[in-house]
Amino acid sequence: MHLIDTPGLSPDKRHLPDMDTLNYIKTRLKSMDRQIDGVIYLQRVMDLSNANYAVRNLDAFLNAFKSRGFRHVVVAATNWDRVTSEPDSSALEGYFYDHLDRECLAHSLGVRIQRARLRDSTDASWDLLENMRYVETPEPSPPPSPPPPSPASPLPSSPAPDGSWVLGSRDCEGSSSATTQDIRKDIKSRKGLFLY
């Protein structure tokens, strides 16, 4: 799996999205004869009230990189460690995803948007990448049966029925889970190219 950072795509800029950044990435990928398989879109939980930025950025990604292989989008809400009122944040999250489902081009192009809550830990990031293994193929296929949870890996290895994941309930401290260690070992052998 290869990850490409997209610097300069920010809700603080006047002209969203930054087409120069997207065109640069597109040109580089074309020169390497590669296509984007998906996007991991990180959205701060405190910015969920303005879903228009996410819609514009995701639509720009979809238009710039549309291909048969571009089929997967994960929108992960970050900074949950800064949440002071869980009910208020959950309401904002619901509004955000409803707006995204209604306005984003993804569904009309056959691209499924998956959801995640990304906690502030290294393990949460690795868990997000671990879950990406279910969506790395260009053609949709059913995920393998998830293993039963164990004390070493209490997180689900597949999304909840609503298509969301809650990642990173563990701290950064302590030893990494067996799943995280396995991911770190074989990440180089994974196929797929994702923007984040």
Image (spheres, rainbow, N blue to C red):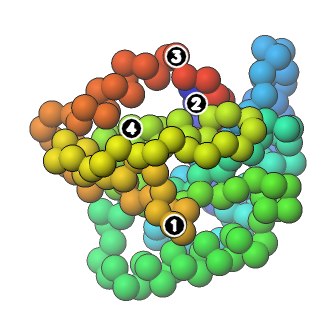
- The residue that disc 4 covers is 126
- The residue that disc 2 covers is 3
- The residue that disc 1 covers is 161
Q: Is residue 170 above or below residue 25?
A: below
- The residue that disc 3 covers is 189
In three-dimensional space, the C-alpha distance between marks 2 and 3, rounded to whole angstroms, equals 13 Å
In three-dimensional space, the C-alpha distance between marks 4 and 3, rounded to whole angstroms, equals 15 Å
- Identify the residue shown where x is 46% and y is 67%: 45
- Identify the residue shown where x is 31% and y is 41%: 123
Closest to the camera, between mark 1 and mark 2, is 1
Q: Is residue 30 left or right of residue 176?
A: right
Of the residues under marks 2 and 3, which one precedes in the sequence?
2
- Identify the residue shown where x is 87% and y is 48%: 63
Of the residues under marks 1 and 2, which one precedes in the sequence?
2
Q: Nearer the viewer, residue 161 or 61?
A: 161
In three-dimensional space, the C-alpha distance between marks 3 and 1, rounded to whole angstroms, equals 29 Å
For residue 19, say whether it is visible.
Answer: yes
Tell me where residue 51 appears, x and y as whole percent: 65, 71
Which quarter shows the C terminus? top right
Task: Please give the label number shown on residue 146.
Answer: none
Verify CB contact (< 8 Å) between mark 4 and mark 1.
no
The amino acid type of the residue labelled 1 equals: Pro
